[in-house]
Image (spheres, coloured by chain):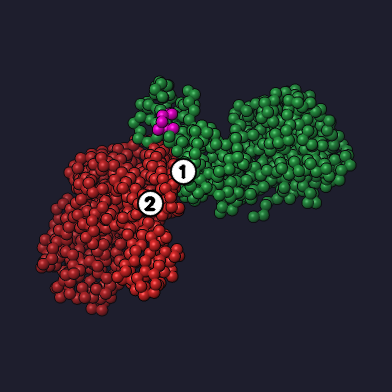
Chain colours: A red, B green
């Protein structure tokens, strides 16, 4: 049998796999499907992670090196660019699959390692320092002595529904998504279900918005569906701008069609024939992948006019943001989409009733929408069986900070924070002690050790004063200064405030100023200054309360969270900064006190010459000494000492 | 639908669709606000009007939040008051510390709010905004340091004036109100109308003040200072100093100006009569020739600038007549030189106007003759009030000054120029006479009176019907221009005033004009029309005299040179 051409593959996938899917295949169908899914291969296949995380780690060079290798060795192999598997800290990741053998995954494959690594594989050995595991394939020969990839601690507790395909399939080819069951839900939906029914199914699944608010998605859709209007809009909020959050990016880069299918179903459910993807301007990689995916979906007849002959129309447009954090807030996003300044407006009216250009509009987060196809495919009860009551399904997190592993993870709701830290993240790097976990982005909270056993979920986190937020999770070790961290978040929010309402614009600025004065050395010695600084801490609490109470939108209302939570759980650090003028973690430069180790000091005189305050005394070739009362903590001596004789406390 | 809600533990009836503030206003509870504007949709910028609603975790802005049946509201609970006070303290943390020297001292809404909320210390210490005064505009000055970003100026400029010359630039605490490329307010889009000053709660916006130099002129023995006043000014002065607005007010007003040292006092209404004559002749000519219709009036310099800069397609439709201020300036300069034996360079003509754009107009190149402007200085009504106070004029002790100046007679038609619709009424009276040779009957056109932004009517003159429109608020004019561009061709004459309801609500008028005071000012002017014997411009003996001895026929070539300007597109 000759290999099928592109048109034949397309027809096969659309007709047999999408439209007439029964779950049972004859042998020919099963064979062809296995070929498209690259389960049955006649030549070696190499997968390289080309998500943004991979590219940063140099995977494009790895890709070129692999290409060169196959060219030079005249091996007929297929190179597949895939998205991020989630294990960003192990990038560049390269998977190799030989005909008849299981797929094997290697980490940290930089370009110079490619040749040795591939040579080894073709000689049926693996470079054990790079191999992280193999995929489970029934009828394939396994590599001896290599664990399964899903058994790695990083993956063991995960439940990958939304991320099922990312890192495994090519985001550049719609056939990959189709072969893995893609667009079947859309087909089923537009032909078998009414819009009301779709809203009902989603409502039954108890899916809640993954963008931070946690509002029940089905209920929100029903409002838009039941609001009379000749035009409705669906907006996919892909303006992911929290520092340290990149799950939407992972999804868009790794499995764009899942998001597109979700958008199409959601648009159908509310009666919208136009949808927008509001994409963060910095996500250039996502943009080109999405553009390509939209083009393909249109060519296959999944978007555009008369989808699947159902009479349903849908056009999806990508709108690139202009780099404003506030545009993640739905009303600001709408204002920006309308061509105005991205500033939020008062709710009510809610966008579901009066949104884009005054028409009913649903704004859903990328992850929410990516959940939709699987719910339609497997039913609401399936979705409800994952997670826990009130928080059904899974949640994708961006795991960053001081954990051993970092990357994008998807866990079933209800597992404990400590499980994520100890198991998925693999504990804290370099044997340091865990101090806290920061959850929910810049306006999230720092969860102290005593709350580590809290389960992940909307309501359980609320009990301890935290929220899921977008899904940024930062592991903080003992070297973190909580005051400084809060200052960082406050600076971010203060800069990103739109400036419309007084409490957010002026209040965050004042809070930042107070935090600034806390981490700085007092301008003048004396008790008055200490008192002023202490008053600042008291003012922080008043300000936090008023900003939370009176701000117009979520940005302002949640801006005081980091400060409030750290004041609650780590108040002693504030007091230490103010009264003792010490930063235990040694992060706050200004509060450092420097010392010279007489054992290491050679008396070279360099630090003495460079000290702008003349705070260093000592004669040549004799150990020097720092006068603490004169030292301003600038750190010039520390930087200039060639013998590492200067240390700080 | 009506229902009961609870406000401060009392049952109150509310209607569905109302905002909480609507209900509070009705039952006499005042919540402070810095950004709210009557008649505009609320923006919720200032958060000053927040109230506590049971069941809602945060505080709720009463200006925008609709009432709902279940609501229990507390408007002045300790939590609410603390929030409001903190907001003011936050604003004051970076606000300049120069209240005593501020233009708005004593009239500042922020100052009043701070006093109301008992703010007694600078609680939050922060770097104060440094004053960076934007002096680029000939009419308006901006001090962004004093701006609280309430957004009122942006909204009035955009929604009422329709030009959008200013908007917020920057983000977060770097936000400020700015112009295109932040180049200062002398941008093409700005029409200098000064409505932004009227709504500014603080001293961030004010007119470019010239009254100090006027006082210097008054004390300069070599100069011969004279003043002309707009017909709207005396009523506003009466309002400010609690004087009765009867017939004597004009004489009292003249007495005050005399006391200040002005040698002669002229009523600009007389020049308005002249404008009527020229415009009426111009219109009759165009109407007969079916050329350049509809004709637009050109007394409002902001409107003229709007056409020049933003809709130059309509330049040929503008009347070429100069505004009354400029005609008056030109006439009295010549008159005084010839009659009072003064050298032209010593005559200093001040005009007091309800308008900031007149400052801009007086400085234009086409309003000068051999580099000498027709009007030397323009002050606003507000500036005149300041001068009256500064120079210690006490109205209670003033003897009314009889009207004895050269151009003392004016018809009441000229007086109507201050109100939207009034200019049209005045011109139509003379157009009627010019076209038919008979006086119109009745002279009063009710359709053109009242506080409406757009008034349309059809007037029968002889065998012709003339369709006229009076529009105020430039944003409304835009709609009309769009209609005309789209093919509407039944309109013959349009009167345009930039400020809502006309000059009585001008950008130079005392601040805080509400509907009541506008109606009062309007009534004062219409009352004059009722009582006046000469109700039409063409019967004004001075006008007749002028045309006989000094001028040629209305709208003739000789007059064109003196009383008209040529309208040509402004170079970019």
Disc 2 packing (10 Å; few <14; some 14–19; many ≥20) = many
Percent x, y for residue B302? Answer: 65, 43
Closest to the observer, B515 or A277 = B515
Secondary structure under tag 1 reads loop
Looking at the image, is A227 positioned above or below residue A477?
above
Percent x, y for residue A128? Answer: 16, 70
Residue beneath label 1, please?
B124
Q: Residue at x 68, y 31 (%)?
A: B236
Closest to the observer, B227 or A7 = B227
Q: Residue at x 60, y 26 (%)?
A: B516
Q: Where on the picture, by quarter, is residue A129?
A: bottom left
Kindly tell me whether residue B398 is visible in this rendering: yes
Kindly tell me whether residue A48 is visible in this rendering: no
Residue beneath label 2, please?
A487
Quadrant of the frame with the C terminus of chain A: bottom left
Looking at the image, is B497 positioned above or below residue A91?
above
Callout in the foreground (1, 2): 1
Quadrant of the frame with the N terminus of chain A: bottom left
Percent x, y for residue B416? Answer: 71, 31
Report the number of numbered marks: 2
Q: Chain of mark 2?
A: A
Disc 1 packing (10 Å; few <14; some 14–19; many ≥20) = many
Q: Which residues are magenta?
A: B75-81
């Amino acid at each position: 049998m000759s290999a099928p051409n592109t048109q034949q593959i397309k027809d096969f996938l659309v007709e047999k796999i999408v439209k007439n899917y029964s779950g049972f295949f004859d042998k020919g169908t099963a064979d062809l499907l296995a070929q498209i899914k690259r389960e049955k291969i006649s030549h070696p296949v190499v997968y390289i992670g080309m998500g943004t995380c991979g590219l940063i780690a140099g995977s494009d060079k790895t890709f070129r090196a692999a290409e060169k290798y196959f060219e030079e060795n005249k091996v007929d192999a297929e190179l597949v660019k895939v998205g991020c598997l989630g294990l960003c800290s192990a990038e560049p990741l390269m998977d190799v699959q030989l005909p008849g053998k299981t797929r094997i995954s290697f980490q940290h494959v930089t370009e110079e390692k490619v040749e040795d690594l591939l040579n080894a594989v073709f000689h049926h050995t693996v470079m054990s320092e790079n191999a992280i595991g193999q995929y489970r394939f029934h009828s394939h020969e396994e590599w001896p002595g290599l664990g399964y990839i899903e058994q790695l601690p990083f993956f063991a507790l995960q439940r990958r529904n939304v991320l099922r395909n990312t890192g495994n399939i090519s985001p550049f080819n719609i056939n990959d998504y189709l072969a893995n069951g893609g667009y079947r839900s859309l087909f089923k939906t537009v032909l078998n279900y009414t819009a009301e029914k779709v809203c009902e199914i989603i409502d039954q699944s108890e899916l809640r918005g993954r963008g931070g608010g946690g509002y029940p998605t089905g209920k929100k859709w029903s409002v838009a569906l039941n609001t009379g209007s000749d035009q409705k809009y669906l907006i996919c909020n892909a303006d992911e701008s929290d520092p340290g959050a990149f799950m939407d990016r992972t999804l868009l880069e790794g499995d764009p069609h899942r998001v597109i299918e979700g958008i199409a179903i959601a648009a159908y459910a509310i009666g919208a024939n136009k949808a927008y993807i509001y994409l963060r301007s910095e996500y250039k990689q996502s943009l080109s992948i999405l553009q390509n995916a939209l083009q393909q979906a249109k060519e296959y007849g999944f978007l555009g006019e008369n989808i699947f002959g159902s009479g349903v129309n849908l056009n999806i447009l990508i709108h690139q943001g202009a780099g404003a954090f506030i545009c993640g807030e739905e009303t600001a996003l709408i204002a920006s989409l309308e061509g105005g300044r991205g500033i939020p407006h008062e709710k009510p009216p809610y966008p579901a009733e009066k949104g884009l250009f005054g028409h009913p509009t649903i704004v859903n987060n990328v992850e929410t929408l990516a959940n939709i196809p699987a719910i339609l495919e497997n039913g609401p009860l399936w979705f409800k069986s994952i997670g826990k009551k009130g928080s059904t399904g899974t949640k994708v997190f961006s795991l960053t900070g001081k954990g051993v592993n970092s990357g994008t993870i998807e866990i079933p709701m209800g597992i404990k924070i400590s499980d994520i830290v100890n198991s998925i993240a693999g504990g804290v790097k370099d044997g340091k002690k865990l101090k806290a976990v920061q959850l929910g982005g810049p306006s999230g909270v720092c969860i102290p050790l005593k709350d580590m056993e809290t389960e992940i979920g909307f309501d359980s986190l609320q009990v301890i004063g935290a929220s899921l937020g977008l899904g940024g999770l930062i592991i903080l070790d003992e070297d973190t200064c909580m005051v400084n961290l809060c200052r960082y978040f406050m600076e971010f929010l203060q800069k990103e405030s739109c400036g419309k309402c007084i409490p957010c614009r002026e209040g965050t600025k004042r809070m930042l100023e107070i935090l600034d004065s806390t981490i700085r050395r007092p301008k003048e010695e004396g008790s008055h200054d200490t008192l002023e600084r202490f008053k600042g801490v008291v003012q922080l609490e008043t300000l936090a309360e008023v900003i939370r109470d009176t701000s117009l939108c979520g940005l302002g209302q949640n801006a005081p969270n980091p400060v409030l939570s750290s004041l609650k759980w780590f108040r002693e650090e504030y007091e230490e900064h103010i009264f003792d003028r010490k930063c235990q973690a040694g992060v706050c430069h200004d509060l450092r006190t420097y010392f010279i180790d007489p054992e290491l000091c050679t008396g070279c005189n360099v630090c003495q010459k460079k000290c702008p305050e003349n705070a260093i005394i000592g004669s040549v070739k004799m150990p020097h000494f720092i006068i603490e009362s004169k030292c301003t903590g600038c750190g010039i001596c520390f930087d200039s000492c060639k013998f590492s004789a200067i240390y700080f406390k | 639908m009506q229902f009961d809600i609870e406000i401060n533990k009392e049952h109150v009836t509310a209607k569905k669709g109302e905002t909480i503030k609507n209900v509070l206003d009705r039952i006499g509870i005042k919540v402070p606000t810095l950004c709210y504007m009557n008649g505009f949709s609320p923006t919720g910028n200032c958060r000053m009007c927040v109230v506590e609603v049971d069941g809602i975790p945060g505080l709720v802005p009463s200006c925008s939040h609709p009432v709902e049946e279940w609501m229990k509201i507390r408007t002045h609970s300790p939590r609410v008051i603390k929030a409001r006070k903190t907001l003011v303290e936050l604003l004051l943390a970076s606000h300049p510390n120069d209240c005593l020297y501020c233009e708005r001292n004593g009239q500042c809404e922020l100052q009043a709010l701070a006093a109301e909320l008992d703010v007694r210390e600078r609680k939050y210490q922060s770097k104060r905004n440094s004053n960076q005064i934007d002096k680029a505009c000939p009419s308006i000055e901006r001090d962004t340091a004093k701006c609280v970003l309430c957004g009122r100026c942006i909204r009035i400029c955009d929604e009422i004036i329709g030009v959008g010359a200013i908007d917020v630039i920057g983000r977060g605490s770097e936000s400020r109100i700015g112009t295109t490329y932040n180049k200062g307010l002398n941008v093409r889009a700005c029409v200098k109308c000064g409505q932004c000053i009227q709504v500014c709660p603080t001293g961030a916006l004010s007119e470019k003040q010239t009254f100090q130099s006027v006082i210097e002129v008054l004390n300069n023995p070599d100069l011969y200072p004279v003043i002309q006043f707009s017909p709207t000014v005396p009523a506003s002065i009466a309002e400010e100093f609690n004087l009765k607005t009867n017939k004597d007010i004009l004489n009292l007003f003249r007495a005050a100006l005399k006391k200040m040292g002005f040698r002669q006092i002229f009523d600009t209404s007389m020049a308005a009569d002249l404008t009527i004559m020229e415009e009426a002749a111009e219109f009759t000519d165009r109407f007969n020739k079916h050329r350049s219709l509809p004709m637009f009036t050109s007394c409002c310099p902001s409107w003229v600038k709007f056409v020049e800069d933003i809709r130059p397609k309509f330049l040929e439709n503008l009347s070429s007549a100069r505004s009354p201020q400029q005609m008056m300036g030109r006439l009295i300069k010549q008159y005084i030189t010839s009659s009072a034996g003064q050298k032209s360079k010593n005559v200093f003509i001040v005009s007091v106007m309800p308008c900031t754009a007149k400052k801009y107009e007086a400085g234009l190149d086409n309003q000068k003759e051999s580099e000498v402007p027709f009007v030397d200085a323009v002050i606003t009504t507000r500036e005149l009030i300041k001068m009256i106070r500064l120079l210690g004029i006490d109205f209670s002790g003033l003897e009314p000054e009889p009207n004895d100046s050269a151009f003392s007679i004016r018809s009441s038609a000229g007086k109507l120029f201050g109100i939207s619709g009034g200019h049209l009424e005045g011109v139509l009276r003379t157009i009627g006479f010019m076209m038919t040779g008979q006086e119109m009957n009745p002279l009063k056109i009710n359709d053109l009176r009242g506080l409406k932004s757009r008034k349309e009517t059809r007037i029968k003159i002889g065998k012709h019907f003339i369709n006229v429109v009076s529009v105020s608020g430039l944003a409304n004019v835009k709609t009309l221009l769009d209609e005309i561009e789209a093919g509407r061709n039944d309109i013959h004459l349009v009167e345009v005033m930039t400020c809502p309801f006309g000059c009585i609500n001008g950008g130079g008028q005392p601040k805080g004009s509400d509907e009541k005071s506008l109606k009062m000012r309007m009534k004062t002017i219409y009352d004059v029309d009722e009582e006046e014997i000469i109700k039409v411009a063409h019967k004004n003996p001075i006008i007749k005299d002028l045309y006989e001895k000094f001028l040629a026929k209305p709208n003739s070539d000789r007059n064109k040179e003196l009383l008209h300007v040529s309208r040509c597109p402004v170079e970019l």
